[in-house]
Image: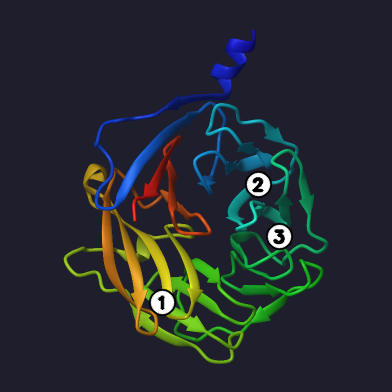
Amino acid sequence: MEDKMKKMLLMLLVLTTASCGGGKWEKKAEYKTSFPFTMAGFINDDCGITVGMFGEVHSTKNGGKEWPKIPEFNDKYAIDALATGQFIHAGFAGKVGIIADGETSEPLESPISGIVMLVNFLDEQTGCAVNKLNDIKFTADGGNTWQDIQKPETMGIIISIDLYSKNGICVLDNTGRLYVTNDGGANWKKTALPVEKYIINFRELKPYSASMRFSDESNGTIAIIAPAKEAKKSSVLVYKTVDGAKPVIADEIRCGLNAGSKLFLSPDSSYLTVSGDDAIILFKGMD
């Protein structure tokens, strides 16, 4: 019975072939789960989380050997993680929760208005989120209250967001523009991602089609899906920012993807999780 339960929880496939990968990124593992999920994210070789519909939240602390279910409610669409190891999840009804021990979820005091599609926290007190109406919400008191961040009129649908300081926010929209503010949204600078030889239909991309981690306005990592007509020819482009957040392509991870796949960079940008089509693929940067 115990063996059957383990098989039902997860089939873990650690692939040694180079069928998916490239550049300075090593494919560490591929996971096939028996439970549904909307997206997944790992912060190291051992610790990861999946979230899904109807409160389907699972975590692992042993590299995917076990995925205990965490009691939760409501549909989940968004995840983040802190450098200290806590996972954050959000979704329907604007509810945001923090998982500190990998076993239980604690809700924040106040929900966000609307369905949460993206969530990102700097620490346990300071965080931001994007709802389905494309509003940016900000909290400085651990979710007790949420304020609106003023956006530029030109900003499109937000597909990734990163809070790198208490007033510093980076936003990537579905026109391929990167917006940066150092004063909580009072002023924004923008630049376009250079796609070079890649033809990216940004309009097809959705929340978590990209993932970003910044240390300040000038230094960061951006991963974004470059879908191709043939999924097996799709890639993840990894950008590095230099000289005032002007991004340049640093690497390409060749992997079968589609516009519905989702990306998650660990807080230190050393692990990249690609999830979709009932599979989770974990990459580790080899810098």
Q: 210 or 205: which is nearer to us? A: 210
| Residue 38 sits above or below residue 265 on the image | above
Q: Amino acid at mark 3?
A: Gly
Tell me: residue 161, above or below residue 77: below
- Mark 3, Cα crowd under 10 Å, few <14 / some 14-19 / many 20+, is many
Depth check, front residue: 149 or 22: 22
Estimate the x, y position of residue 45 in percent, counting from the top left: 49, 40
Instruction: Tell me the kind of residue under disc 1.
Output: Leu
Near mark 1 (Cα within 10 A), the count class, few <14, some 14-19 or many ≥20, is: many
- Marks 2 and 1: which is nearer the front? 1
What residue would you read off at disc 1? Answer: 178
Q: Which residue corresponds to the image point at 56% horizontal and 34% vertical from the top-left?
A: 36
Query: First in sequence: mark 3 or mark 2?
Result: 2
Residue type at mark 2?
A: Asp
The residue identified by callout 2 is 75
Q: Is residue 120 above or below residue 44?
A: below
Q: Position of residue 167 (x, y in %)?
A: 62, 82
Tags 1 and 3 in contact by the CB under 8 Å rule?
A: no
Q: What residue is at 36 percent from the left and 65 percent from the top?
A: 203
Local secondary structure at mark 1 = strand
Q: Report whether 212 appears left or right of 227.
A: right
Quadrant of the rendering where the C terminus is positioned? bottom left
What's the CA distance linking mark 3 and mark 2?
10 Å
Q: Nearer the viewer, residue 24 or 203?
A: 24
Q: Earlier in the sequence, mark 2 or mark 1?
A: 2
**Residue shown at the point (74%, 75%) measured from the top left:** 140
**Residue in the picture at 64% in, 7% down:** 1
Q: Which residue is mark 3?
A: 94
Q: In terms of depth relative to the viewer, which is nearer, 100 or 227?
A: 100
Residue 99, given in percent of the width and then of the height, sits at 71, 48
Q: Secondary structure at mark 2?
A: loop
